[in-house]
Amino acid sequence: MIRGGENSSWLWLLLIGLAMMSLRACEGSPAGRVSPSPDAVPEFIGPATPGQDFAAPPETRAIELANGYRVHEGQVAEALREAGHAETWMSFGWTFGDETVTTVAPGLDRRHHFVNAYLVGYVPFEGVDAWVPLVSLAQRKQYAYDHDQYPGMPEIWQTSREAFFYPEGDCEDHAIALADWLIGLGLDARVVLGRMKEEGHAWVVVLDGARTYLLEATHKRPGRALPLASQLPDYRPEAMFNRESYWVNTGSPLTTDYTGGRWQRRSGFRRD
């Protein structure tokens, strides 16, 4: 853990666990626009090489806090080196002034990135119902633990493009791929980090007016129905993010509310 004041170039680092878990079924109310055949799976275009989505310099990916303080990934890399964690293949909660402001996680390029950066705007098939990405992902990708895919590395994240191209991945890989596609369809989708039955997990929520849907991206038998978050109390949200923002649950994780005042926006993300 590294500690520094507001005038320091370093921030606190707090290790957070994102353990994997087994699949969970989805049930609920439908949402979406167009209804193509349920087995209409698009042709996916993958990255040229692992980590290609992070080819731009680390200074081009940055977060900005409410007080205007800006941190880019070059500073993250330096802080991790100073702390001896440059090759610690886990996600870290990045804190400032005793508050978690984002999460950083290692990618296939073996560098740590802000979690928002894993949503690279990958939309393989446009103009479809919200259930189509869920079904396509279930058919395209198999669940696999990171430590099985990458020996000696307990946690490695894939970008949304990588997650659709590479045939295996764990919960955050599935959630990132699903959320990014849904965002590309114009939906308010977010990746949620938290726990499910005491196990670290990642899933997706879609905010639709007064309704919030919870999508279990690792489920391999999804239907066209999307479940309401209010019907799934076993999910315990701690933080969530989309392409531009990172929120922290400042209340109890024993909630199905993903829109109330308990959710505090801690940082914004931008690519220069």
Image (tube, rainbow, N blue to C red):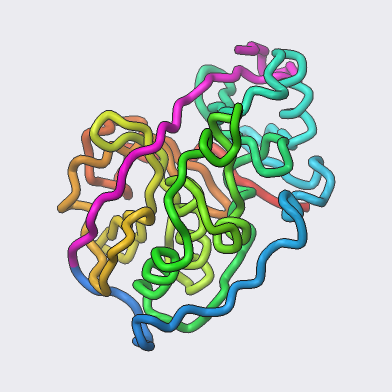
Magenta-colored segment: predominant secondary structure = loop
Q: What stretch is highlighted in magenta?
A: 1-28
- Residue plotted at (43% across, 83% down): 40
184 falls in the magenta region: no
In the visual, does 173 lie left or right of 5?
Answer: left
Outermost residue toward the left in this view? 231
Q: In this view, does 2 lie above or below 153?
A: above
- Up the image or down, 11 lies above or below 167; here it is above
Residue at x 64%, y 49% (from the top left corner): 117
Query: Where residue 4 sits: x, y (%)?
Result: 67, 13
Residue 173: where, in percent of width, then height? 51, 50
Please, is residue 57 above or below residue 1 in the view? below
Image coordinates of residue 204 in percent, x first then y, are: 38, 53
Q: Which of 65 and 144 is in front in this view?
A: 144
Direction from residue 108 to residue 237 in the image, left or right: left
Is residue 16 covered in magenta?
yes
Which quadrant holds residue 212? bottom left
Measuring 18% from the left and 65% from the top, which residue is drawn there?
Answer: 28
Please identify the quadrant where the N terminus is shown.
Answer: top right
For residue 174, side relative to residue 157 (left or right) = left
Foreground residue among 264 and 201: 201
Can you name the residue that lies furthest to the right here?
57
Q: Residue at point 71% right, 33% down?
A: 71
Q: How many labels does the image show?
A: 0
**Residue 16 or residue 220, whichever sits in front:** 220
Q: Please tell me in which quadrant of the rendered image residue 196 appears.
A: top left
Decide which of 203, 79 is in the foreground and name it: 203
Q: In this view, does 150 lie above or below 168?
A: above
